[in-house]
Amino acid sequence: MLPELAETRLGLGAKGLGWMHAAQAGGGLVIGGLIFLLPQRRSHVVPFAASLICLGTALIVLAQVQGLAATLLVLAVISAMITAWDIFTQSMMQLSVSDGQRGRAMGTWVFAIGSAPLGHLEIGFLATAIGTDWALSLNGMAVVAVIAVALAITPALRRL
């Protein structure tokens, strides 16, 4: 989606795309450092859910935002929330299994990360079919809906 946003919305081409990637990298680095500095939590479900709700909301905002500065800020937030979600997911997986099962838990996480191209195909298909802005909005709404449903129907998730 970034090349499309850089070219059509911002009219910046490769230079703008580079700024967008830099904003994403910065957002991920900042939140990773902040999470590292936070004291260890007993439960990760609140920051996990908050990161996903913020991610979904930021995707919806990205569909509407205009201008380079605002786009870069939203991209930094999106990357920060993806990084936070990733950190909390791995932490919850490792803490929910015995020491002897941690390798299997990591294998499950690696399998999930390996399925990322399916999401890339999905949003590319949607962007082609309904447009970039609608694809981003729909994906943002889906992220929020999935975490809300998962929390509502999975008591074990609420205890992590």
Image: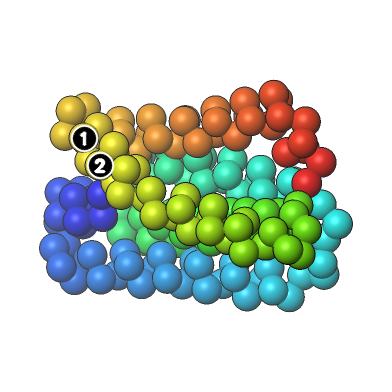
Q: Is residue 141 left or right of residue 115?
A: right
Q: In the rendered image, is residue 84 in sight?
A: no
Residue 34 spot, x, y in % from top left: 67, 71
Q: Secondary structure at mark 2?
A: helix
Q: CA distance from mark 1 to mark 2?
A: 6 Å
* 127 relative position to 87: left or right: left
* Left-right relation of 111 to 49: left
Q: What residue is drawn where x is 23% and y is 65%?
A: 17
Q: Nearer the viewer, residue 109 or 41?
A: 109
- Colour scheme employed for the rendering of this structure: rainbow
Q: Is residue 101 visible?
A: yes
Q: Quadrant of residue 149?
A: top right
Quickly name the residue at label 2. Answer: 121
Label 1 amino acid? Phe
Q: In this picture, is 56 found above or below 27? A: above
Pointers 1 and 2 in contact (C-beta within 8 Å): yes
For badge 2, the amino acid type reads: Leu
Count of numbered tags: 2
Q: Which mark is residue 46?
A: none
Sort mark 1 into few (<14), some (14-19) or many (20+) by Cα contacts within 10 Å. some
Residue at 77% x, 70% y is 38
Element assignment for label 1? helix
| Residue 65 coordinates in the image, percent (x, y) | 36, 45
Which dot marks residue 125?
Answer: 1
Residue at the location (73% across, 75% down)? 37
